[in-house]
Image (cartoon, rainbow, N blue to C red):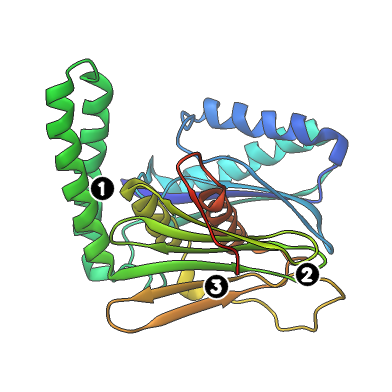
């Protein structure tokens, strides 16, 4: 029997001088298992109790199909450990976790009852993206395909109920930081970059509907609603970024964490928001406040 799984890999406490070797070992293991291309980019971070942390997972809209997963998972865990230990030349923490992609969680952004429709729209959008690559030489056909793709993206955004997503990442005037507000309906965004010393530069920009949908999908897959972090006092000059999600219903979700702590889901979403906040050529400077 086959299962649709969301898989994630976490490596903790590896030797820093062997980071490239450990990453290569994971890539080789994925290729051996026929999972090459199924996982996203590697995320590197540092967690004081466990040292260096390396994490990756497969995208939300492309679950991994595994036959007899109850047999495969423990064997895969053992094989992955062997490969990582050899590359690291020492033992470290190796975790391969799996979640049933078809099992409702109630912890994402998209209501469980709407997930089948979301995935159906995502599959149709993926087909249009492939068609754009295939027929890129035909300008008129590409215009038609892009219009269909935008319609599908709008339908996904409307289905999610998300109106805007914001990052508040302004630690203090000595470090600087970034604020981003992204409107879901049209991809318009406002960006505030604060330099060390407190000078703020404001920009108005535009991100694609694909950017918006991929962000919503990532936050759903990473169970944004369930993100929790231990409450503790901050250390001097430690940042505490916040992520806000606003819905058509009037609901607002706010999740935050201290910068020195590691949280797989929060860190992946935070990194993606910083990528979206990076200034692009078409972003327009606005009067600083």
Give the CA separation, mark 1 to mark 3.
24 Å
| Residue at 39 percent of width and 75 percent of height | 246
Give the CA separation, mark 3 to mark 2.
28 Å
Looking at the picture, how far across and down is residue 211, in whole percent? 39, 48
Is residue 269 positioned above or below 250 on the image? above
- Label annotation for residue 102: none
Give the CA separation, mark 2 to mark 1.
41 Å
Looking at the picture, how far across and down is residue 20, in whole percent? 75, 31
Pointers 2 and 1 in contact (CB under 8 A)?
no
Given this view, does label 2 or label 1 mark the residue nearer the observer? 2
Looking at the picture, how far across and down is residue 53, in whole percent? 73, 51
Residue farthest along the front direction in this orientation: 287
Helix, strand or loop status at disc 2 = loop
Q: Which residue is mark 2?
A: 173
Q: Residues within 10 Å of mark 2 (few under 14, many from 20)?
A: some
Residue 89 seen in the figure: no
Helix, strand or loop status at disc 1 = helix
Locate the C terminus and report the quarter of the image it occupies: bottom right
Locate the N terminus and report the quarter of the image it occupies: top left
Is residue 234 positioned above or below 182 on the image? below
- Label annotation for residue 122: 1
Pointers 1 and 3 in contact (CB under 8 A)?
no
Q: Residues within 10 Å of mark 3 (few under 14, many from 20)?
A: some
62 horizontally vs 200: left or right:
left
Helix, strand or loop status at disc 3 = loop
Give the camera-side residue of 6 and 279: 279
Residue 248 seen in the figure: yes
| Residue at 61 percent of width and 45 percent of height | 77
Give the camera-side residue of 172 and 98: 172
Return the disc, 1 or 3, that comes first in the chain's sequence: 1
Q: Which residue is mark 3?
A: 227
């Amino acid at each position: 029997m086959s299962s649709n799984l969301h898989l994630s890999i976490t490596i903790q406490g590896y030797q820093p001088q062997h980071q490239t070797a450990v990453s290569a070992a994971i890539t080789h293991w994925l290729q051996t298992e026929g999972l090459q291309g199924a996982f996203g980019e590697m995320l590197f971070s540092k967690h004081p109790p466990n040292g260096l942390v390396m994490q990756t997972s497969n995208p939300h809209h492309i679950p991994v199909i595994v036959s007899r997963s109850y047999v495969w998972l423990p064997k895969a865990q053992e094989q992955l450990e062997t490969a990582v230990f050899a590359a690291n030349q020492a033992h470290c923490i190796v975790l391969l976790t799996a979640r049933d992609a078809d099992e409702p969680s109630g912890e994402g952004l998209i209501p469980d009852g709407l997930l089948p429709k979301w995935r159906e729209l995502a599959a149709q959008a993926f087909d249009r993206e492939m068609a754009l690559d295939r027929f890129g030489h035909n300008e008129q056909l590409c215009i038609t395909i892009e219009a269909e793709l935008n319609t599908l993206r709008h339908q996904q955004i409307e289905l999610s109920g998300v109106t805007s997503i914001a990052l508040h990442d302004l630690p203090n005037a000595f470090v600087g930081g970034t604020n981003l507000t992204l409107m879901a309906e049209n991809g318009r965004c406002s960006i505030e970059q604060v330099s060390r010393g407190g000078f703020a530069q404001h920009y108005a920009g535009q991100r694609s509907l694909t950017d918006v949908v991929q962000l919503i999908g990532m936050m759903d897959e990473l169970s944004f609603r369930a993100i929790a972090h231990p409450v503790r006092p901050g250390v001097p000059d430690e940042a505490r970024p916040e992520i806000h999600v606003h819905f058509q219903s009037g609901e607002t979700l706010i999740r935050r964490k201290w910068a020195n702590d590691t949280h797989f889901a929060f860190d992946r979403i935070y990194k993606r928001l910083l990528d979206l906040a990076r200034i692009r050529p078409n972003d327009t400077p606005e009067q600083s406040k």
